[in-house]
Image: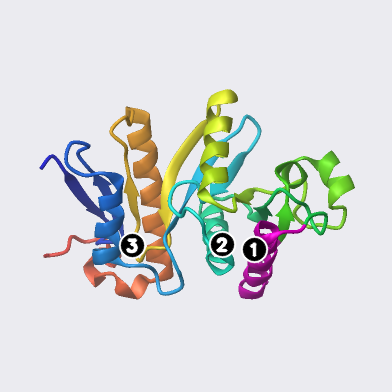
Amino acid sequence: MGELDREAGAGYGAILLRSALVLASLWLFVVALQLIKTHPRAKLVSSVFFMCLPDQVLVYGDCAVNPDPNAEELADIAVQSADSAAAFGIEPRVALLSYSTGTSGEGADVDKVREATRLARERRPDLLIDGPLQYDAATVPSVAASKAPGSPVAGRATVLVFPDLNSGNATYKAVQRSAGVVSVGPMLQGLRRPVNDLSRGALVEDIVYTIALTAVQATEAVKAEPERLPQPWLAGTPSST
């Protein structure tokens, strides 16, 4: 069928390289959800892109999977994205984005982001999380000083969580293409084991990036659950299976 399934770290990392003539990305998610399933601490599967700007790397989520997450799901995406950032050495300062900053606007969309921010803070008080924030207030210090002066995140956000797929996907592509920024991803998160996807237009460097991302995810999974690994693997000797 033209597919390659590779397992790394005794089942902790899986890179599914699929034939574009046989399977679409939808089937990757179907297989992953059926066989690997979501992590016990995750309510859904989401994704992040690592946006490699000239002076920093920003994490964008979710720009590839969930069309219109509700407040609870958006909070879960924020927490997952923060953990993914930390796994790659990026200090997570999480901004939940909206067309309004703070209390400057009202409406169902803003209320959703506001509630998601509350839920994410409640779930992970150890993280710096703020919202709703406009993109400029989240990333530009001078704008943050006037729009959100008391925010611990505004002006220095490293993890940007978009309210829906429309805004997230459009923004990452706009930044990637208009600013000539290298974007690495999407990297899936929220599964019990790492799984990532490559498109039919993937270049060699895309494949290398995806392998590297999945290897780091696998390493973090090993650290989190070392007891689930076969003892010979932990000892550095080949397993008999």
Residue lying farthest front?
107
- Tell me if label 1 and label 2 are in contact, CB under 8 Å: yes
Name the residue that disc number 2 marks.
74
Q: The disc labelled 3 sits on which kind of residue?
A: Arg
Tell me the SS state at disc 1.
helix
Say which label, 3 or 2, has the lower sequence index.
Answer: 2
Choose between 128 and 131: the one closer to the eye: 131
Q: How crowded is mark 2: few (under 14 residues within 10 Å), some or many (20 or more)?
A: many
Say which label, 3 or 1, has the lower sequence index.
Answer: 1
The label nearer to you, 3 versus 1, is 1
Q: How crowded is mark 1: few (under 14 residues within 10 Å), some or many (20 or more)?
A: many
The label nearer to you, 3 versus 2, is 2
The mark found on residue 101 in the picture is none
Name the residue that disc number 1 marks.
112
On the picture, is 135 further left or further right than 10? right
Identify the magenta region.
106-129
Q: Quadrant of residue 238?
A: bottom left
Residue drawn where x is 68% and y is 51% of the image: 98
Q: The disc labelled 2 sits on which kind of residue?
A: Leu
On the picture, is 185 further left or further right than 80? left
